[in-house]
Image (cartoon, rainbow, N blue to C red):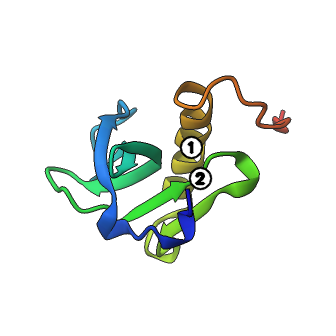
């Protein structure tokens, strides 16, 4: 799939990813383009328009759709974690790489 052609407006909600808190104004969803799930995205609560997404079919082919500067860094980090979950759960057991854990 040519991910370069995908814009936020063309993404639809597929499967809700459970929130860890209730005080956010946006929700994280797996997103689909047509009938294919292509990544994860943020949607306003009770809204159907994607405001930011990470799409792709592997870690080195990921693309951010939308403007990440409109969101806090913690939101971007959460979306990155959700994208890793998408790679593992939707595309299969994909090797993501080693994460450094701070002690």
The location of residue 98, given as percent across then percent down, is: 85, 35
Q: Is residue 78 visible?
A: yes
Question: Which quadrant holds residue 76?
Answer: bottom right
Calculate the distance from the C-alpha at mark 2 to the C-alpha at mark 1: 9 Å
- Neighbor class of circle 1 (other Cα within 10 Å; few <14, some 14-19, many 20+) is many
The location of residue 29, given as percent across then percent down, is: 36, 43
For disc 1, the marked residue is 83
- Neighbor class of circle 2 (other Cα within 10 Å; few <14, some 14-19, many 20+) is many
Are circles 2 and 1 on residues that touch, CB within 8 Å? Answer: yes
Disc nearer the start of the sequence (2/1):
2
Classify mark 1: helix, strand or loop: helix
Viewer-nearest residue: 29 or 39: 39
Q: Residue at x 35, y 36 (%)?
A: 21
Left or right of 89 on screen, residue 22: left
Q: Which mark is residue 18?
A: none
Q: Residue at x 46, y 59 (%)?
A: 53
Left or right of 71 on screen, residue 85: right
Q: Residue at x 69, y 23 (%)?
A: 93
For disc 2, the marked residue is 56
From the image, which quarter does the N terminus lie in?
bottom right
Q: Residue at x 57, y 32 (%)?
A: 85
Classify mark 2: helix, strand or loop: loop
Left or right of 70 on screen, residue 96: right
Q: Residue furthest front?
A: 1
Q: Is residue 4 above or below residue 43?
A: below
């Amino acid at each position: 799939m040519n991910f370069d052609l995908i814009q936020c407006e063309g993404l639809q909600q597929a499967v809700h990813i459970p929130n860890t808190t209730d005080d956010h104004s946006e929700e994280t969803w797996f997103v689909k383009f047509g009938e294919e799930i292509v990544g994860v995205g943020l949607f306003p609560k009770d809204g159907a328009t994607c405001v930011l997404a990470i799409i792709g079919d592997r870690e080195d082919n990921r693309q951010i759709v939308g403007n990440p500067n409109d969101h806090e860094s913690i939101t971007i980090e959460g979306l990155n974690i959700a994208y890793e979950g998408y790679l593992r759960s939707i595309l299969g057991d994909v090797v993501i790489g080693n994460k450094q854990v701070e002690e």
